[in-house]
Every structure is written in structure tokens, then in C-alpha cells.
Image (cartoon, rainbow, N blue to C red):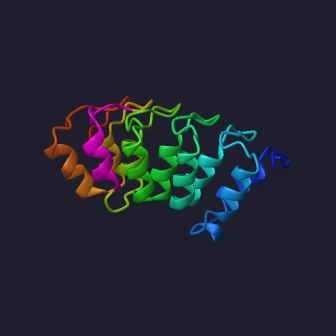
């Protein structure tokens, strides 16, 4: 169960990332029961939890979390599982990880938090959930762009309005001198 393919993926990585099995946890549970490591890392430092969050497998994420998967571990690009769940647009997984205590303001190596991503990839309800759990709505990424910059850039006007209503600064320029 710990054998790896050329990318360093174990059978558990492959099972968790398989969109065909999203509604079923049987394969993942069988592999874990047979000794598969829930925190095994592939060559890009992705864990099975990264694969499940990216694929949108809510039931699989629940199993991995219950079995001790590291919910905060970033991959080699500095991307934690919550970022992938936000990008995948899976509200239930986002809620679950936030409910487990994952910090919604943890940046990836480019300084993007889950809130930055929610503003870039508008999926109903995700930005609202992340905004509710965030304490700094103006934290910039490496380019000095706040979540409000990104909400405006990606024409996510509902999220932009919500950010402004909750006190996000409107006139703060990014490192290129552009304001939201």
C-alpha cells in the first residue's frame, strides 16, 4: 500500500484524487485499514488530503481528517489543502476545514490566502464563509493586492460589496499603484 508511481503518488493519493469515486470512501478506507499513510507525500509534497480537496471528495476528506491527516501541511508550492478546496469550489470541504480550525488567512508562498482565492474564483457562498472567519480583510498578497483588488479585478461584485461593508479599505494601492 506504500508503493509509489513515478510521481511519488501512493495508491491512497490516486484513490483520493479519483473523481469517479467521489461519493465512495470504500477504497480509501480499505487502503488506510491496510496501513496506507494518510500523510504520505508525493514528489510535489502533496498529501492524499491535497488530492481529495482538489478533486472535491467531501466524504474522503472527512475520512482522512478522522484518520489524522495533517490539515495544514503545505505542498512544495506552499499551498495548503484549504486553498485547493477553495479553488475547487467545494463549499462543504471549505466549511469542514475551517471548522477543524484551519486559519483562513494562511498565505501560500505568493502571499495569497484562501480569501484572495475566493475573490478570484467566485463560487456561491465560499467567499462569505471565508470572510466570516477572517480577521484581516485587507492583507495583501506579494503584489500588494488585497482581496478587494481581486474581487474587483475578477468582477466578483457581490464579494467586493461584502468586503467594503465589513470594512475593507477601498483606496489602498497595490505595488503597481492601482487601487481597487
Location of residue 50 in the rendering, given as x and y in whole percent from the top left corner: 60, 47
* Placement of the C terminus among the 4 image quadrants: top left
Is residue 134 rendered magenta in the image? yes
Residue 98 or 127: which is nearer the viewer? 98
Location of residue 158 in the rendering, given as x and y in whole percent from the top left corner: 23, 57
Is residue 36 rendered magenta in the image? no
Measuring 52% from the left and 49% from the top, which residue is drawn there? 84
Location of residue 173 in the rendering, given as x and y in whole percent from the top left corner: 28, 32
Residue 145 or 163: which is nearer the viewer? 163
> For this view, does 61 lie left or right of residue 130?
right
Instruction: Magenta stretch: give its range.
Output: 126-140
Residue 56 visible in the snapshot:
no
Does residue 36 lie above or below 156 as drawn?
A: above
Question: Residue 14 lies in what quarter of the image?
Answer: bottom right
Q: How many marks?
A: 0
> For this view, does 115 lie left or right of residue 55?
left
Residue furthest to the front in view is 33
> For this view, does 157 lie left or right of residue 105?
left
Measuring 24% from the left and 31% from the top, which residue is drawn there? 172
Location of residue 77 in the rendering, given as x and y in whole percent from the top left corner: 61, 36
Measuring 35% from the left and 55% from the top, which residue is drawn there? 126
Residue 26 visible in the snapshot:
yes
Residue 130 or 144: which is nearer the viewer? 130
> For this view, does 122 lie left or right of residue 57?
left
Amino acid at each position: 500500500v506504500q508503493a509509489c508511481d513515478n510521481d511519488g503518488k501512493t495508491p491512497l493519493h490516486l484513490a483520493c484524487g479519483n473523481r469517479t469515486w467521489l461519493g465512495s470512501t470504500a477504497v480509501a478506507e480499505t487502503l488506510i485499514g491496510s496501513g496506507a499513510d494518510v500523510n504520505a507525500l508525493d514528489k510535489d509534497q502533496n498529501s492524499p488530503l491535497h488530492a481529495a480537496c482538489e478533486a472535491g471528495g467531501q466524504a474522503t476528506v472527512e475520512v482522512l481528517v478522522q484518520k489524522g491527516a495533517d490539515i495544514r501541511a503545505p505542498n512544495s508550492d506552499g499551498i495548503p489543502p484549504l486553498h485547493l478546496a477553495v479553488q475547487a469550489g467545494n463549499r462543504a470541504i471549505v466549511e469542514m476545514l475551517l471548522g477543524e480550525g484551519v486559519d483562513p488567512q494562511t498565505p501560500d508562498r505568493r502571499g495569497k490566502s484562501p480569501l484572495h482565492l475566493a475573490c478570484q474564483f467566485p463560487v456561491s457562498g465560499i467567499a462569505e464563509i471565508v470572510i466570516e472567519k477572517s480577521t484581516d480583510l485587507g492583507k495583501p498578497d506579494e503584489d500588494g493586492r488585497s482581496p478587494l483588488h481581486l474581487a474587483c479585478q475578477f468582477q466578483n461584485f457581490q464579494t467586493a460589496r461584502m468586503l467594503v461593508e465589513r470594512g475593507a479599505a477601498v483606496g489602498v494601492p497595490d505595488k503597481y499603484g492601482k487601487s481597487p
